[in-house]
Amino acid sequence: MSALIWFLRGILFVIFLGLAIKNSSDIELRFFFDASWQAPLFLVVLCSVAAGVVLGLLALLPQVIRQRRRIGSLQRQLERGIAGTVEVKLPAQ
């Protein structure tokens, strides 16, 4: 299974490398106040994807922190419950 995953990664790498080579022409990004930046198209797309990944991870960060705190709290409660005596009452049948 691991070999299959590495094979698929290699195929994706070759495809993306081919796209980067085919789209290597320079483009000009124009910003406000007559500022501009010239860069290859694949670099602009790569930077845009990387910025999207970073923003997505930053958006998830508060939820991950809350979940880690909750997991820690539940683990401490579980350890306290195991250390002490715990009575389990079964419903009468």
Image (cartoon, rainbow, N blue to C red):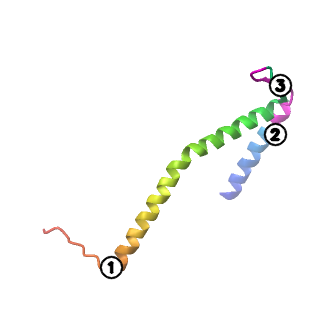
Q: Quadrant of residue 39?
A: top right
| Residue 17 badge | 2
Residue drawn at the location 71% of the way across and 35% of the way down: 48
Residue 21 on the magenta span: yes
| Mark 3, residue position | 27
> Is disc 1 in contact with disc 2, using a CB cutoff of under 8 Å?
no
Q: Which image quadrant for residue 31?
A: top right
Instruction: Residue type at mark 3: give it.
Output: Ile
Disc marking residue 84: 1
**Earlier sequence position, callout 3 versus callout 2:** 2
Give the foreground label among 1 and 2: 1
Q: Say left or right for 3 vs 88.
A: right
Q: Which x, y percent locates residue 25?
A: 86, 27
Segment tinted magenta in the rendering: 18-33
Q: Is residue 31 above or below residue 7?
A: above
Question: Disc 3, disc 2: CB below 8 Å?
Answer: no
